[in-house]
Image (cartoon, helix red, strand yellow):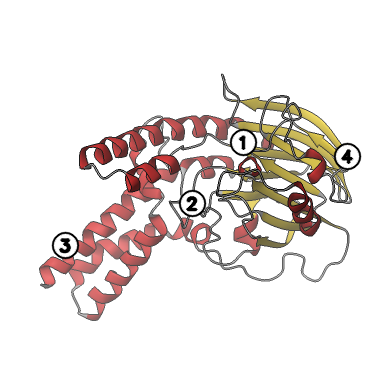
Amino acid sequence: MRWFLSLIGNLIALTAAFGLLARYVPPQVFWPPAIIALLLPGLLVLTAIYALFALSRRHWPGAMLPIAVILFSIPVLDQLFAWPGGDERDGAVGPTVTFVTGNQRLFRSYDGKDVDHNRVADAFRSFNPDVALLQEVRPAKNRMNYISSIQAAERLDQRHQKEGTLVATYAGSVQPVTSSFTEPNEYNGYIVTDVETALGTVRVINAHLESNQISGLADNIQEDGSYSNRLETFGHMLTGYGRTSRLRAQQAEDIRTAVETSPYPVVLGGDFNDVPSSYTYNQILSPRLKDAWVARGRGLGTTFTGPLPGLRIDYFLVDTSLSVVSIERLSPNWSDHRPLRMVISR
């Protein structure tokens, strides 16, 4: 029995180690670790439990690999399991700016119906943001575009949204800088906007990186009773994830360049469609940025509530010249993403 437990424990540890490679290995070179990275928090917890069990039984050989994996994971632990220290402001007082980001899923409720406009307006009033970074919102040419409902909130009078795309930044004063979207449908990408705030000009990057499109496939696997069809769908899921992870890696490199060349402090937010242990996240997180959830959040910070739960894929990354006063997850409302609300200061 001890031999069997040692085998299982070390296999889990080895799988976790494979997932840890995702942050270092570009998916253009080798993408399978990106899949395992989705499960990394649970794998590391199981690895730690087995390591403690092996040590308690004085089974030193069986504990060596799990302990090595836990030590190797130290650089990513605070990104996976946030536990903030003291207040970044250290008692300082001054102006603050409130940001909200969230994937709105086209303002369709879970039954597929369009959400009532008054409900959307009430939600954005309650968020009370100075700046809103929204993804999957309908453009002006769509009759049901919800623009007026969003602008019902104070200080969201102006909008930057490239015509025909689904990414929009709202604030009291916006100056469009640039945008980049994946052709031909321009569904995923990012926009760059200079926003005048109480802290001065802030360069806001609103990102909706390449979608995995595996939620629908996961639903199909659950609904389809045929084993062969399930296996085929699972294969499509894996190959699709490899393709999208490569596209996100390229988008991450472009965004990193936009961050490092900005003449103003940067706030980057949005739906990255990837986890903190991914290559995408670590490529974007340049020395100029810090993760607001790591700075002021607590725990896993799960933002995705769909068929693959437990994932933190929505972020605020903030210029190191700014302080994160607070960050919280809001109720998901009509979307399978939980919005984030962040307050920053100097």
**Dot placed on the residue nearer the N-terminal end, 4 or 3:** 3
**Dot placed on the residue nearer the N-terminal end, 2 or 3:** 3
Can you give x and y, in whole percent of width and height, for residue 5 in the image? Answer: 17, 68
Can you give x and y, in whole percent of width and height, for residue 310 in the image? Answer: 47, 58
Q: Secondary structure at mark 2?
A: loop
**Dot placed on the residue nearer the N-terminal end, 4 or 1:** 4
Q: Quadrant where the N terminus lies?
A: bottom left
**Crowd class of label 1 (few under 14; some 14 to 19; many from 20; radius 10 Å):** some
User: Label 3 is placed on what type of residue?
Assistant: Leu
Q: Nearer the viewer, mark 2 or mark 3?
A: 2
The quarter holding residue 35 reads: top left
Determine contact: label 2, label 1, CB under 8 Å.
Answer: no
> Which mark, residue 204?
none
Q: Quadrant where the C terminus lies?
A: bottom right
> Which mark, residue 7?
3
Q: Badge 4 is on which residue?
A: 173
Q: Badge 1 is on which residue?
A: 256
User: Label 4 is placed on what type of residue?
Assistant: Ser
Q: Gap in Å between the C-alphas at discs 2 and 1?
A: 28 Å
Residue that extends furthest to the top in the rendered view of this protein: 184
Q: Nearer the viewer, mark 4 or mark 3?
A: 4
Which residue is at 32% across, 48% downward? 18
Which residue is at 68% across, 61% downward? 327
Can you give x and y, in whole percent of width and height, for residue 205 in the image? Answer: 70, 38
Q: Gap in Å between the C-alphas at discs 4 and 3?
A: 60 Å
Q: Is residue 340 visible?
A: yes
Which residue is at 46% across, 38% downward? 212
User: Label 1 is placed on what type of residue?
Assistant: Arg
Q: In the image, 207: left or right of 125?
A: left
Q: Badge 2 is on which residue?
A: 306
Q: Nearer the viewer, mark 2 or mark 1?
A: 2
